[in-house]
Amino acid sequence: MTMTEENETITMQEEEQIHSWHSQLLRNISKSLHDFRMADRPGKVDMLGKWGLFIPAVASTLIIVLILAFLWFESVPILVDPSGGPGIVVSPTWDPNRDLFGIAIFIVGSLLCAGIAIGLAVPLGIGGAIFLSEFCPMRLRQPIKMIIEMMAAIPSIVYGLWAYLVLVPIIKNNIAPITQSPTNGLSLLAGGLILAIMLLPTVVTISTDALQTVPLSLREASLALGATQSETSRKIVLSAALPGVGAAVVLSLGRAVGETMAVLMVTGNSLQIPYSLFDPTYVMTSIITNQLGYAFVFPLWRSALFAVGLVLLIMSICFTLTAKLFIRWGMKTRGYI
């Protein structure tokens, strides 16, 4: 068989598969419509409810795919240009005036800021949630929880202003002198700390709700077997609430990587890789915010900023999937799945 005949055979097979899929789809739609017509009133309401829930789920997935496709389309010019290419992901030099579009410094800055924030916010947030759920007196629980929820509603620009006026001077005058590190306060540490403060309400609120859904019978059984209240909270209640606590961590990861204004105001926005907590840094969201207005009329520069957005979205998706895998592993080791 010649190469042309093989290609024609493959094409015919693909056409047959597409036709088969199309026919199956039409049969499923026809069957669904027939079932809807034949169903009684409660059955029709149930079917409409299922379709109504199915459409937003598909739309959410479609939106993510469309955003990825849009960012990819806008990033192609820099990825195929000789002055760019896939190597911009590992290149540390960003100088649009010389057609140098290395985005590694922004990736490193974002990862370090997010790492500091998650490392501080998640343990403190889970600890606070355990206190509110297991140890806090009932008369104080609701007021404290309400205050924490109000913190989650504060705009990020307000956090940024507070950090610029309060946190940055503290780092400059009180923390940096301890290590004898020269800094003006605008630093990686400032970005990580303000991000951690912003993430705390999310972690505490979602984790508290998850812990409070654990049945009381599990606590009573643990205490009856001789465990202390602290052991019950750590080993029984927290373990049973792992899916909800994991959801809090996933949401925190997304916000830590994608936060813009507060980080923009306190990190110094210096085009360098930070080698200490007191060095200024530049994160991915900040470079897009600062330069997109100027770069919009320069095709390569504009495309490079969209490439930064593409990498940022891919990182967020990877973080979320990784967190989900860890949560699933934790649930599996505890016998929940």
Image (cartoon, grey):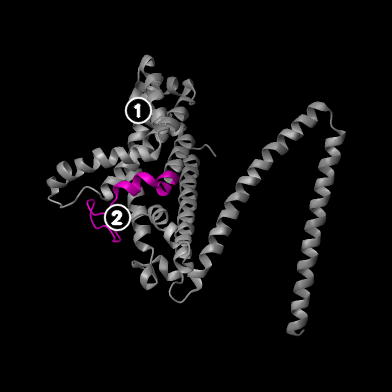
Q: How crowded is mark 2: few (under 14 residues within 10 Å), some or many (20 or more)?
A: many
Q: In which quarter of the image is the C terminus?
A: top right
Give the numbered dot on residue 200: none
- Residue in view at x 35 percent, y 23 percent: 229
- Residue in view at x 33 percent, y 49 percent: 113
Which circle's residue, 1 or 2, is located before the other in the chain?
Answer: 1
| Residue 226 appearing in the image | no
Whether residue 116 appears in magenta in the rendering, the answer is no
Q: Could you tell me which secondary element the residue under label 1 belongs to?
A: helix
| Residue 15 image point, x, y percent | 79, 67
Farthest-out residue, top: 139
- Residue in view at x 46 percent, y 59 percent: 311
> Viewer-nearest of labels 1 and 2?
2
Give left or right: position of 96 versus 281. right
Tell me which corner region of the image, top left, top right, bottom left or bottom right, holds residue 34: top right
Residue at which label 2 appears: 281
Whether residue 275 appears in magenta in the rendering, the answer is yes
Tell me which corner region of the image, top left, top right, bottom left or bottom right, holds residue 154: top left
Q: Residues within 10 Å of mark 1 (few under 14, many from 20)?
A: some
Residue at which label 1 appears: 231
Range covered by the magenta-colored residues: 254-280
| Residue 188 image point, x, y percent | 28, 50
Q: Could you tell me which secondary element the residue under label 2 belongs to?
A: loop
Report the amino acid beneath label 2. Thr
| Residue 52 image point, x, y percent | 70, 37
Give left or right: position of 4 versus 135. right
Alpha carbon separation for disc pair 1 and 2: 41 Å
Give left or right: position of 92 versus 244. left
Q: How many labels does the image show?
A: 2
Report the amino acid beneath label 1. Glu
| Residue 79 appearing in the image | yes
